[in-house]
């Protein structure tokens, strides 16, 4: 039997899951630094070749991961630091720095499912300017230069009967933004990264991929404009939790590989295949981190207006 397939949306975890024999995978660059004062670890994974993309199961592009262990804590000052760090990383990712742009922000997910409500709740707290500037001009904000920010919450296909990509594509064709920013909840491999990690990538996103619901991708190739995706892992595959528990219980066993064990006993664990776990306080966490992400986006786009 093959190894058990771990579902993760984080490029950092995909890189970690590669065997030691492939640890020096060609076409993948990893840069890492630690902000000691803010207690934030930033890892930049760049996938440069098609072979590397195939090995990691991720599209070619840049993936920046911010790990903030205390992000689940109700510390306003710390969340402000995370927002500022997110703004800095986002600015480096966004094309056309220093130019006025029309930017559409899309909050993916289902507002009625708490663990999947990150995108809609981020949209709720954004500083939207497009309609005001179109109606009254930039003088309404007492400035000469300003990005036009608009937002969309497309919902899920079960409620709309339409693919998210169809809705977003229609809005893009009608409003013609220069750039798309997409926010979505992700799935993680490790429980220690649950609600504590932010990933930013310029590769776009495939809605629902983390929980196995493969929908049409939102990418520059499909939409014709640059797409930057921001996500926070809010769920973890139940089978990987079992694997982690087994690894801890059998830590004394030499060379115990939990994923290999799960793969060898696939039939036993098959009932866990479609189960995803989240924290008991996910409602409070989503409310907190969604505001943190929205403030990071607001700061990034506001700083671009200087």
Image (cartoon, rainbow, N blue to C red):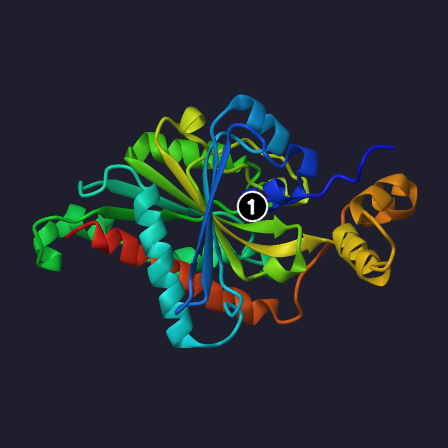
The relative height of residue 161 versus residue 288 in the rendered view (above or below) is: above
The residue located at (57%, 38%) in the rendering is: 161
Q: Is residue 295 visible?
A: no
Image quadrant assignment for residue 282:
bottom right
Image location (x, y in percent) of residue 181: 38, 44
Foreground residue among 267 and 101: 267
Foreground residue among 109 and 291: 291
Q: Residue lying farthest top?
A: 50
Image quadrant assignment for residue 57:
top right
Image quadrant assignment for residue 170:
top left
Q: Is residue 66 visible?
A: yes
Image location (x, y in percent) of residue 97: 23, 42
Image location (x, y in percent) of residue 16: 63, 44
Q: Please tell me whether mark 1 sits on a helix, a strand or a loop.
A: helix
The relative height of residue 293 versus residue 268 in the rendered view (above or below) is: below
Left or right of 84 on screen, residue 97 = left
Q: Identify residue for label 1.
A: 12
Left or right of 115 on screen, residue 101 = left
The residue located at (17%, 51%) in the rendering is: 305
Image location (x, y in percent) of residue 259: 79, 45
């Amino acid at each position: 039997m093959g190894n058990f397939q771990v579902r993760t949306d984080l490029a950092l975890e995909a890189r970690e899951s590669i065997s030691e024999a492939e640890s020096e995978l060609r076409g993948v660059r990893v840069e890492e630094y630690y902000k000691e004062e803010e207690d934030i670890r930033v890892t930049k994974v760049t996938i440069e070749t098609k072979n590397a993309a195939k090995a990691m199961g991720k599209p070619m592009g840049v993936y920046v991961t911010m790990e903030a262990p205390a992000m689940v804590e109700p510390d306003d000052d710390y969340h402000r630091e995370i927002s500022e760090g997110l703004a800095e990383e986002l600015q480096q990712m966004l094309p056309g720095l220093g130019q006025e742009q029309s930017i559409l922000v899309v909050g993916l997910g289902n507002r009625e499912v708490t663990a999947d409500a990150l995108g809609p709740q981020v949209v709720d707290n954004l500083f939207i300017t497009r309609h005001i500037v179109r109606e009254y001009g930039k003088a309404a904000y007492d400035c000469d230069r300003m990005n036009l920010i608009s937002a969309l919450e497309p919902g899920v296909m079960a409620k709309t009967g339409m693919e998210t990509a169809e809705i977003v594509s229609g809005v893009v064709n009608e409003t013609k933004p220069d750039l798309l920013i997409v926010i979505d909840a992700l799935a993680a491999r490790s429980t220690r990264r649950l609600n504590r990690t932010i990933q930013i990538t310029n590769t776009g996103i495939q809605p629902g991929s983390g929980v196995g619901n493969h929908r049409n991708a939102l990418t520059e190739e499909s939409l014709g404009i640059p797409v930057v995706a921001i996500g926070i892992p809010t769920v973890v595959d139940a089978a990987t939790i079992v694997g982690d528990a087994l690894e801890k219980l059998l830590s004394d066993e030499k060379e115990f590989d939990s994923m290999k064990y799960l793969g060898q006993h696939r039939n036993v664990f098959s009932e866990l295949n479609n189960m995803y776990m989240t924290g008991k306080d996910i409602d409070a966490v989503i409310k907190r981190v969604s505001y943190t992400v929205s403030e990071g986006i607001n700061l990034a786009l506001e700083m671009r207006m200087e």
